[in-house]
Image: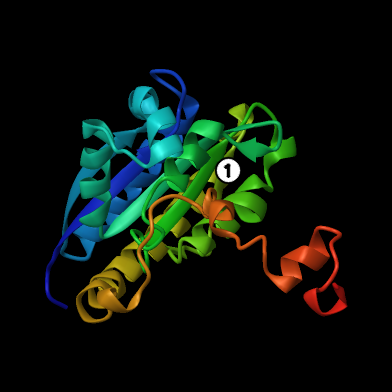
């Protein structure tokens, strides 16, 4: 096995400093780094703190204009070999800052990149958010989430079970980074994908309201019936 230098990017939506979300992400990053080095690889770690991007988020969402911090974050993600994405959970969903950040990215920016999904909450009632919400979001972005998701309520941080899950997720991420799949996709077939910033929001302005189908959908009559 040839030694590589991997670029690991931690994306944290923790609302405070320090935050339990960033603590969980840091533990995962430390374990990834340790396991990768045991296998002969160097690891360079970059951190994207979404709360630092919040002043630029409204304009990015409304007009897809990226401010300097957003552009720096995008450049960091482009170069990532692996990602740890961590979000706090509010009312059974990942934070709006976390989902808003992802919604303004090029839909294919993260394609093929391996990701550890992680979430924290004040109660274990939110434990399914990682697999029910975050995993589907990252599937839409066509990333490769590792099989083991990470969730931590306050009582979990001192548990051996969380430590074991972190190790398992880290091992899965290292193996996926070693595969080189994301870089191969980017190098060989990148031009074959449709690249768009933002979600499909706003495309309703391009709907042809005069078509027969739209006339029927809005309660009008088919042209053939008119006259």
**Residue beneath the point at 43% across and 64% down:** 143
- x, y percent for residue 173: 37, 61
Give the residue at mark 1. Answer: 151
- x, y percent for residue 82: 31, 57
- x, y percent for residue 106: 36, 55
Q: Quadrant of residue 170?
A: bottom left
Seen in the picture, residue 29 relative to 190 is either above or below; the reply is above
Q: How is the image coloured?
A: rainbow
Residue 29 appears left or right of 5 = right
Q: Nearer the viewer, residue 206 or 181?
A: 206
Seen in the picture, residue 51 relative to 220 is either above or below; the reply is above
Residue 170 appears left or right of 71 = right
- Mark 1 secondary-structure assignment: strand
Quadrant placement of the N terminus: bottom left
Q: Residue furthest top?
A: 17
Q: Residues within 10 Å of mark 1 (few under 14, many from 20)?
A: many
Q: Residue furthest front?
A: 227
Q: Nearer the viewer, residue 20 or 78?
A: 78
Seen in the picture, residue 37 relative to 58 is either above or below; the reply is below
**Residue beneath the point at 67% across and 43% down:** 127
The reply to whether residue 167 is in sight is yes
Quadrant placement of the C terminus: bottom right
Q: Quadrant of residue 39?
A: bottom left
**Residue beneath the point at 46% across and 41% down:** 86
**How many numbered marks have been drawn onto this rendered protein structure?**
1
**Residue beneath the point at 55% across and 33% down:** 96
- x, y percent for residue 24: 45, 36
Seen in the picture, residue 74 relative to 181 is either above or below; the reply is above
The reply to whether residue 158 is in sight is no
Q: Nearer the viewer, residue 115 or 35?
A: 115
């Amino acid at each position: 096995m040839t030694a590589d230098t991997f670029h690991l990017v931690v994306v944290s939506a923790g609302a405070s400093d320090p935050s339990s979300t960033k603590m969980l992400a840091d533990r995962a990053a430390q374990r990834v780094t340790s396991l990768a080095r045991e296998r002969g690889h160097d690891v360079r770690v970059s951190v994207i703190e979404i709360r630092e991007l919040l002043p630029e988020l409204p304009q990015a969402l409304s007009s897809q204009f990226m401010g300097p911090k957003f552009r720096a974050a995008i450049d960091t993600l482009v170069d990532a070999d692996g990602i740890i994405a961590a979000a706090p959970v509010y009312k059974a969903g990942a934070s709006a800052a976390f989902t808003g950040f992802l919604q303004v990215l090029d839909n294919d920016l993260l394609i093929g990149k391996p990701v550890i999904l992680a979430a924290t909450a004040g109660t274990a009632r939110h434990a399914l958010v990682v697999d029910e919400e975050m995993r589907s979001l990252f599937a839409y972005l066509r990333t490769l989430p590792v099989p083991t998701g990470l969730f931590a309520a306050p009582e979990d941080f001192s548990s051996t079970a969380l430590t074991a899950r972190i190790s398992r997720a880290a091992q899965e991420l290292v193996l996926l980074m070693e595969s080189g799949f994301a870089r191969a996709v980017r190098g060989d077939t990148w031009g074959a994908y449709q690249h768009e910033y933002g979600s499909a929001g706003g495309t309703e302005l391009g709907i042809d309201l005069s078509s027969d189908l739209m006339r029927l959908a809005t309660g009008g009559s088919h042209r053939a019936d008119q006259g």
